[in-house]
Image (cartoon, grey):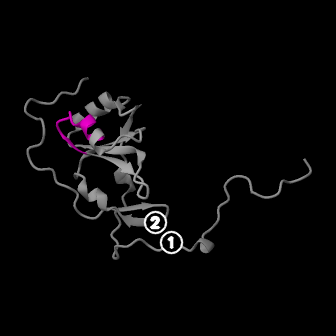
Amino acid sequence: GELKRAAGAAAPAEPVKKIGKPVFRQAGGDRWEDKTLGEWPENDYRIFVGDLGIEVNDDMLSKAFAKYPTFQKARVVKDKSSNKSKGFGFVSLMDPLDYHKAMKEMNGKYIGNRPCKLKKSDWTTRNDTRDVKNKFAPKRKPDEKRKHIAIGPAAGPPKSGL
């Protein structure tokens, strides 16, 4: 069935509440505060936009999704040191109908020089919601005290006898 929005139920009338509070992330044994996530709306429907060309910036991504009435924000993820695009970004919509419509209509559409690939953002699953007394990431073990897990064949002299 086709999803339809009730007449007059376009964008929500009340202002969108931003997350505002610190959001902690966890990956690879590290924990850190992601200050950029506080700028995003709370309880939004977020889309991961992949396969973006390096020419695509926040403005181009925003214009591509601005036709949806509950569009809130778009951001292209950039490398911190080089400031170059990493080839993906995120789009925030407040209405599930806009979200489904955008997923259906925009997947494979050209944004810049390449067709984009959309999927549901799983950013919340990467949050670290533990209540921690200190707000800093735990210290990582020094390299020499970490367990080494060999992956693949050992890089040593070739074994003879074959």
The residue at which mark 2 appears reads as: 30
Tell me if mark 2 has few (under 14), some (14-19) or many (20+) residues whose alpha carbon lies within 10 angstroms of its own: few
* Label annotation for residue 10: none
Q: Is residue 157 left or right of residue 115?
A: right
Residue 79 % position (x, y): 42, 54
The residue at which mark 1 appears reads as: 140
Q: Name above or below for residue 12 compared with residue 7.
A: below
Q: Amino acid at mark 1?
A: Arg
Residue shown at 33%/69% (left/top)? Answer: 131
Q: Is residue 85 left or right of residue 99?
A: right
Q: CA distance from mark 1 to mark 2?
A: 7 Å
Please say whether residue 70 is one of the residues in the magenta stretch. Answer: yes
Element type at mark 1? loop
Number of numbered callouts drawn: 2
Q: Name above or below for residue 6 compared with residue 52.
A: above
Residue 87 % position (x, y): 42, 43
Q: Amino acid at mark 2?
A: Asp
Residue shown at 54%/73% (left/top)? Answer: 141
Residue at the outermost right position: 161
Pointer 1 or 2: first along the chain: 2
| Region in magenta | 61-73
Residue at the outermost bottom position: 134
Residue in the foreground of this view, choosing between 7 and 116 = 116
Please say whether residue 122 is one of the residues in the magenta stretch. Answer: no
Tell me if mark 1 has few (under 14), some (14-19) or many (20+) residues whose alpha carbon lies within 10 angstroms of its own: few
Residue in the foreground of this view, choosing between 50 and 9 = 50
Image quadrant containing the N terminus: top left
- Do labels 1 and 2 touch, CB within 8 Å? yes
Element type at mark 2? strand
